[in-house]
Image (cartoon, rainbow, N blue to C red):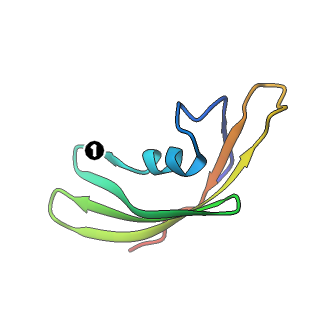
Amino acid sequence: MGWLFMRDMGGYATPRSYLDNQFTYRRDTHRLTVLASAMVGSTYYAACERLADDAERIVFGIVCLTKTSTGARDGCTFGYKDSAPLWR
């Protein structure tokens, strides 16, 4: 997957809080919750739970590389690159 850059983190103070928010959501058929997360240097690690409406539960990890830039010409100051989740 490629990098996703944006102008700001939407009011979140840290990359960790921004990514925790991005990976916590509810959809029509399931919900995803960040159970625990940490930043080690500029790398974000999270343990996530996907709970489907049919009660199927999957726990998996997400790893994201992050970058911050204050002098980007296009004004994009924060970016992340996530890994594809691995589960079956």
Residue 81, relative to residue 73: is it above or below? below
**Left or right: 20, with 49 as reference point:** right
Residue at 46% of width from left, 45% of height from top?
22
Label total for image: 1
**Left or right: 5, with 71 as reference point:** left
- Judged from the image, the secondary structure of the residue bearing numbered disc 1 is loop
Residue at 42% of width from left, 70% of height from top?
60
Residue at 75% of width from left, 26% of height from top?
75
**Left or right: 86, with 42 as reference point:** left
Kind of residue indicated by mark 1: Arg
> Which of the image's four quarters has the C terminus?
bottom left
In percent of width and height, residue 68 lies at: 74, 43
Q: Nearer the viewer, residue 45 or 4?
A: 45
Residue 13 picture quarter = top right
Residue 85, relative to residue 23: is it above or below? below
> Which of the image's four quarters has the N terminus?
bottom right
- Tag 1: Cα neighbours inside 10 Å, few (<14), some, or many (≥20)? few
In percent of width and height, residue 20 lies at: 46, 51
In percent of width and height, residue 78 lies at: 68, 39
In percent of width and height, residue 36 lies at: 42, 65
Furthest-bottom residue in this view: 88
Mark 1 — residue? 27
**Left or right: 57, with 78 as reference point:** left
Q: Nearer the viewer, residue 53 or 68?
A: 68
